[in-house]
Image (tube, rainbow, N blue to C red):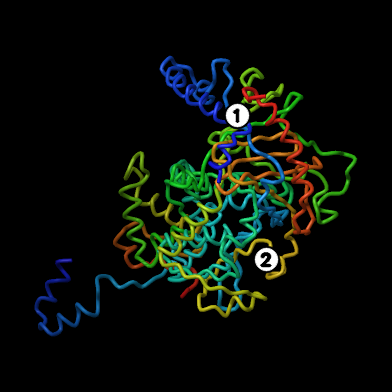
Amino acid sequence: MASGNRFADPFGRRDMLKGSLAVGGMLGLQACTGGGAGGIASASSSGGRPLLVPMRVSPDQLIDIKCCLRPFRAAGPNLSTEQVGDTLVIHNYGHGGSGWSLSWGSAEIAVGKALSVLPREIAVIGCGIIGLTSAIVALRAGMKVTIYARDLIPRTRSYRASGSFTPDSRIALTEPAGPAFGDTWETMARLSWKTFRTYLGLPAQPVEFIDSYGVSDKPMTRRHDPADPAITDSWATKGLPQQNSEFASYGSRIKDIVPQSVAIPAEESPFAMPYTNRTSIMHFNFAAYGHLLMTEFFERGGKFEMREFHSPGEVATLKEKVVIHSTGYAARDLWKDKTLMPVRGQTGWLVPQPEANYGLRFGTVSIQAKTDGMVIMNNSPDLGEMLGVGDSNEMPDRAPIEEAMRVLAPIFAAMPGRRA
Amino acid sequence: MMRRLAPIAALSPVLLVALALAAPAPVQSASTTQGVYTEAQAAAGAELYGAVCATCHGKMLEGTYEIPALRGRFMGNWGRAPISSLFDYVSTAMPQMAPGSLSAEDNAKIIAFLLKSNGMPAGTKALPASAEALKAISFDPAAAAK
């Protein structure tokens, strides 16, 4: 479908692709002459400006709007165990906006707890990213595994995320999580990161790195939200966080391995904007990655049974006496965990554009190329981590997505090197 | 060993077969669930662990992607076997930068700490510092599971 559009070539993309090829040759020379990391990172034209294919952002390209509720707990994910009758239940839910990112590390913790009683077989409840990775880790450790869930991963809330490596996005509040959680978080994040590395470069790009550009007409500074003394209430008094400063931030603990933003001089920016930065970000392509995980699960002999549970007691009726419980936001009802709070999030999806494989952020709106679509987000008003907190409305809302397109389209239209 | 074998050799072949079937090597008479180390031993082991093992295995025994965790999965690796296997391994292969450099007593202390960290109860008798004695102690999961 993309090739059909290329014939029309409304944005002069063919010229730009030719330009990119010429640039490729120069890149080799740059590398030979010791151009350094900057030279390699940007396939620059003679003017030092990398050429990118502009993204098509218009409502006719919109193919999906996904809305979901992040399962947020002030104290961080529930990784505890409890005995229900003769069944050992190992909880693994409540990862906020960090489920995909922490999944492998969290699965390792849950499966480790299962292994401590050496079961031959276990059950996993839930088939979102946490349940599925828990099941695979258990299979890899030699256990027999049955997943009981009402849906396979494509119809879970996990699939309605944006799917980027964001390991400390709404993962906990600093105070209720306590200092010890930081260490657990770091263990999970590092183990997950290492595991994602094993999926890089595979066919269909289940996990990949892309360049994400941030642009602005003002100098960009790292967001910092000091506590506002005028806000005297907090999660402790209201049951919901009241300001950004309450949210835990652990990202700096792994900055030795996770790429950070670098500023790009205006004359080297692919965009006609005064200020640009670039970050290499890792993300998960749902279709390819989800398929790969399901394939491994079944190839290792995992069983899937479609089933709904309505009370913890029902879980104890399973033949498996060790159960990993990973139902995410649904644990609020199934396990009556009222400490789970919804944090609403929404993404719009445009037709995939493999030739424009990068991301762009401007203020509170962003677009990012993924293999199953261009994910577009409008995180305004600018509330940071507070956006969507306590909001359990899971109905898609098209207006903010169209608004994001209106904000982004002129930036692509003004890209240097584009035919007038 | 020879002293035990000598009188056995004098027994009838039938009895010999019966003995072989009934007694596969030393009888396992104890389980790690029954309190096979002392708190003092585990505390000393924790100090040794911090000084010698934590560099690689982590202060929470969490391991890394490459280095085995000493909790959780640890039971999968070493459970339902005599604790002597673990003692043997630690005595000969660990610490990796200086294998076999710790005394038998120190290795027993470290294993006591690992048992405690894996939910095994302390008791009144210290964990023996010899592989031979540890053959009689089985590393069992805390709770039976299917």
Q: Label 2 lies in what chain?
A: A
Left or right side of A413 for A242: right
Label 2, residues with CA under 10 Å away: few <14, some 14-19, many ≥20: many
Q: Which of A218 and A334 is in front in this view?
A: A218
Identify the residue shown where x is 68% and y is 70%.
Answer: A334
- Say which amino acid is labelled 1: Gly
Identify the residue shown where x is 75% and y is 59%.
Answer: A394
Can you tell which mark lies on residue A239? none
Q: Which residue lies furthest to the right in this view?
A: A230
The N terminus of chain B lies in quadrant: bottom left
Q: Label 1 lies in what chain?
A: A
Q: Where is residue B136 in the image (x, y as percent from the top left)?
A: 33, 68
Label 1, residues with CA under 10 Å away: few <14, some 14-19, many ≥20: some
From this view, report whether residue A7 is shown above or below residue A67. above
Task: Check if mark 1's residue and mark 2's residue have beta carbons within 8 Å.
Answer: no
Q: Earlier in the sequence, mark 1 or mark 2?
A: 1
Q: Position of residue B97 (x, y in %)?
A: 36, 39
Q: Which of A141 and A346 is in front in this view?
A: A346
Can you tell which mark lies on residue A331? 2
Can you tell which mark lies on residue A12? 1
From this view, report whether residue A244 is shown above or below residue A51. below
Identify the residue shown where x is 46% and y is 75%.
Answer: B146
From this view, report whether residue B19 is shown above or below residue A411. below
Identify the residue shown where x is 29% and y is 62%.
Answer: B132
Give the quarter of the image for residue A227.
top right
Number of labels in the image equals 2
Q: Nearer the viewer, mark 1 or mark 2?
A: 1
